[in-house]
Image: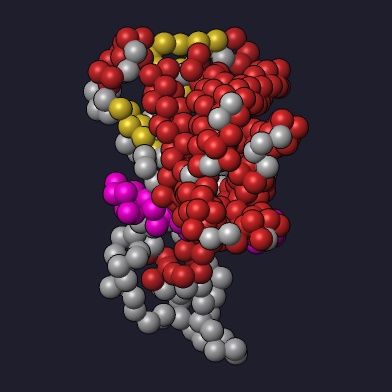
Amino acid sequence: MDPNTSNGAPEHPTLSTPTADGRGGGALDTTPALALDLSKPRYDMATYWGRVQHFGEITDMRLAFATDTELYAARDLLGLHASGGPLPPGTTPSELYRAKQLYDSAFHPQNGELMWRFGRFSFAAIGNTFVGAGMLTFYRGNAAVVCWHVINQSFNGLLNYVNRNTSSPMTDEQLAVSYVVATGSATSVALGLNRAVSAYPALAAGLLGRLVPFTAVAAANLINMPLMRRQELTAGIVVEDATGRPIQSADEVDGPAGSLSAEPIKSTAAARWAIGTSVFSRIAMAVPGMVVPPLMISQLNRRTNFLRRFPRAELPLQLLFSGLGVALAVPLACAIFPQRSSLAVVDLEPEAQRRLQAVGHAGPVYFNKGL
């Protein structure tokens, strides 16, 4: 039995009509691929290690270079599988898992739309490596601080927007205001901390000065994500039942052509939980790439004169340390909380509780927390 399959489907020989090239034909295709349950993640998302494995696959930086042709082909193959086939002759379980890996890395889990390449988490390790190395290397001059924080917040804003919960969309004006405020706050924190530590040259040149970029990034994350997703905080996000279906309200609202229809129940308490856990994960994600490298560089300066002899080596070293840290940090941090989170009805705001009780829903509610 393959322990990596989601339902423990046994591996057995393909029963099919051979074709001229030796691969199985489609007429009698009963491959184990057909028995796989690909509607769920491959790994156990109820455990931290299962989530690490899942996010390790879909945030693999190599997936950022997958072509649109590959991605749409993966989506089409999964669609064929979901409909019951027939699958292309000789399709194997590993090919279906590869298709699911490609799909999960590039298509939004709620609306199924192809996400912009540079906003996918498979690109996060690449982008954060260069941005983090730049911030850690050029952290003293005011112009450099402003430049790198604008770049960093632009990238963070892109990640937040592309991976948002889509049940409460924001207007372009709201996005612009959120971006400007978050960028300004991060830059202000970085400049203020630099000014504070500059009064103590030994601290500014040492480890404390090198940790200013991380402190500014952490502060910006506390501001950026709630601002970029503030529509969720005001309107709430759609809550679902255990099967993944949005729970419909008993209250009727005006629909098309004057008709009345039910609307999905939304919860602001779920939105607060989703955004709060996402902020925590983002800050944790920055630690290996923005705290560990300064510690290593500081130790290198203390124990050797390597960087004093070869000052141009600092940026390549920052890239190396940041790259290794970010590559590990992205799946480890994304896995801290389940992406499909849940709350008990009693933990929701009174209005959401009332609407859920009106339709007889007493169990926990589920929602996509975003990344």
Q: Which residues lie in the magenta part?
A: 44-70
Give x and y (percent) for residue 258.
Answer: 59, 9
* Quarter residue 309 falls in: bottom right
The relative height of residue 244 versus residue 249 in the rendered view (above or below) is: below
Write the residue at 58% across / 40% down.
Answer: 205
Residue 68 left/right relative to 243: right
Residue 68, magenta (yes or no):
yes
Quarter of the figure with the N terminus: bottom left
Give x and y (percent) for residue 35.
Answer: 37, 64
Residue 357 left/right relative to 154: left
Whether residue 142 is visible here, answered yes or no, is yes
Give x and y (percent) for residue 3.
Answer: 30, 67
Write the residue at 46% across / 27% down.
Answer: 275
Residue 321, magenta (yes or no):
no
Quick one: 271 or 294, which is closer to the camera?
A: 294
The relative height of residue 215 versus residue 267 in the rendered view (above or below) is: below
Whether residue 355 is visible here, answered yes or no, is no
Quick one: 157 or 23, which is closer to the camera?
A: 157
Write the residue at 35% across / 64% down.
Answer: 5
Give x and y (percent) for residue 135.
Answer: 64, 41
Write the residue at 54% across / 84% down.
Answer: 23
Quick one: 300 or 295, which is closer to the camera?
A: 300
- Magenta portion: prevailing SS class: helix
Residue 213 left/right relative to 341: right
Residue 232 left/right relative to 3: right
Quick one: 231 or 285, which is closer to the camera?
A: 285
